[in-house]
Image (spheres, grey):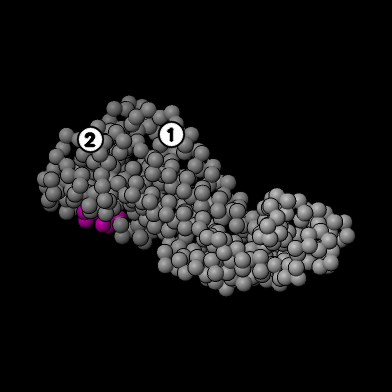
Amino acid sequence: MSEKLWGGRFEEKSEAWVDQFGASIEFDQKLAKEDLLGSLAHVQMLGKCKIIPQEEVETIVGGLNKLVEKLAENKLHFTSVNEDIHLNMEKLLHDEIGPVAGKLHTARSRNDQVATDMHLYLKNQVVEIIHGVNDLLDILIEKAESNIQTIMPGYTHLQHAQPISLAHHLLAYHSMFKRDLERLEESLKRIDISPLGCAALAGTTFPIDRHYAADLLGFSKIYSNSLDGVSDRDFILEFLSNSSILMMHLSRFCEEIILWTSHEFQFATLTDAFSTGSSIMPQKKNPDMAELIRGKTGRVYGNLFSLLTVLKGLPLAYNKDLQEDKEGMFDTVETVLQSLRIFTGMIATIQFHSDTMKKATQKDFSNATELADYLATKGIPFREAHEIVGKLVLACTKKGIYLQDVSLAEYQKVAPIIEADIYYFLESDTAVARRTSAGGTAFSEIEAAIAKAKLS
Ligand code: ARG
């Protein structure tokens, strides 16, 4: 037999440096376990359908199980001479049980084999990521629950806008990550499909039972078109896209943590465990982990765009370009899992400075809407009220005071309907408490949102 498992029709010896370029074993060995599981299901199916005799099935199953054991003990040695994980495994099986190993590839191609491995791999990893998102959701609820009364400035354009509860801010992220969770869960439906038995592209002449093999592998469905089965990578794209959105959410939150832990804000302090120092400036405590998650978001977007680009011009069915689907997917799985873990730890231990946050709402004009609403409630058209308050804000700014510092006499000069109760309405706690519209920042709304989030 020729040195290469596909070498029959070749006359010349291959060049090692060319082989190296085509090889994927350096990275696709991550699929070793899935490849063995796929082979075990395939050979059992061959036996069940009487395509190969039962005793040979048993020999092959024995050999594959041996490889499973060796893999667990880290005793399998892969080489780029054998190109990829599939050919390496076939060679290793041959070393274990001899030429009968060659029967395993009956009614199968590396094209359906690699797609099967990828589906199996991603199915497990997405479940892991779902666990990670769930852990984060739990921590966010916990943190929100202990910060319902923590008042902070809400921002638009990064300018003080209206006071809000910190819990409301945290629950906004809870809503985002909950959508991420739903997207990931929903995507499982399209990952959980078996391409095994699509063979090279057209199906096979052997009387195989694709449903049987799919059942053994725990897949709910099989691809209904063999060309699609071997060339579809939508499930990876969808994963990369869902991961990009998830990372974008993490990154936005990281950006806020970076701002909040700055000297200018002093809204929060990270524990030492999630901070780093400077090699020259002794005072530094840097939010490196938050910055890294923000930075790594870029590589996940990159992985999505690189696969979209790889796929855009591919004719059906399998093309070797598809080998480029792996590194970005592996990298994304690792990046998302690690980022989630670090982020959850960081949020679980972050210390919020409620006094500084509250003070920030007392030395600003974030109560200007309260005054305008007060006037509007008393019958002044809102547009007019807005104009009155705008002029007051301008006058205060010139004097270096805030709306709560204006005397009642001054107020009544501007609008006689203003009464002493205005100072109560100008307090930030009042502003938060009164925003009881559905989904608003009122304490009562937050409590209801937390109760609902706990149930889901
Ligand atoms: N290493 C290849 C990949 O990852 C496996 C499939 C190879 N198939 C082929 N016809 N050359 O895509």
Q: Nearer the viewer, residue 26 or 155?
A: 155
Classify the position of the C terminus by image quarter. Answer: bottom left
Question: What is the three-letter code of the residue carrying label 2?
Answer: Gly
Q: Nearer the viewer, residue 140 or 381?
A: 381
Residue range highlighted in magenta? 61-67
Residue, x 86% and y 61% (percent of image)? 400
Name the N-terminal-most of marks 2 and 1. Answer: 2
Residue, x 44% and y 56% (percent of image)? 181
As drawn, is 108 to the left or to the right of 165? left
Classify the position of the N terminus by image quarter. Answer: top left
How far is mark 2 from mark 1, CA to CA? 22 Å
Q: Residue furthest right?
A: 399
**On the image, numbered disc 2 is attached to which residue?**
203
Residue, x 70% and y 49% (percent of image)? 383
| Helix, strand or loop: magenta stretch | helix
As drawn, 102 above or below 407:
above
**On the image, numbered disc 1 is attached to which residue?**
311
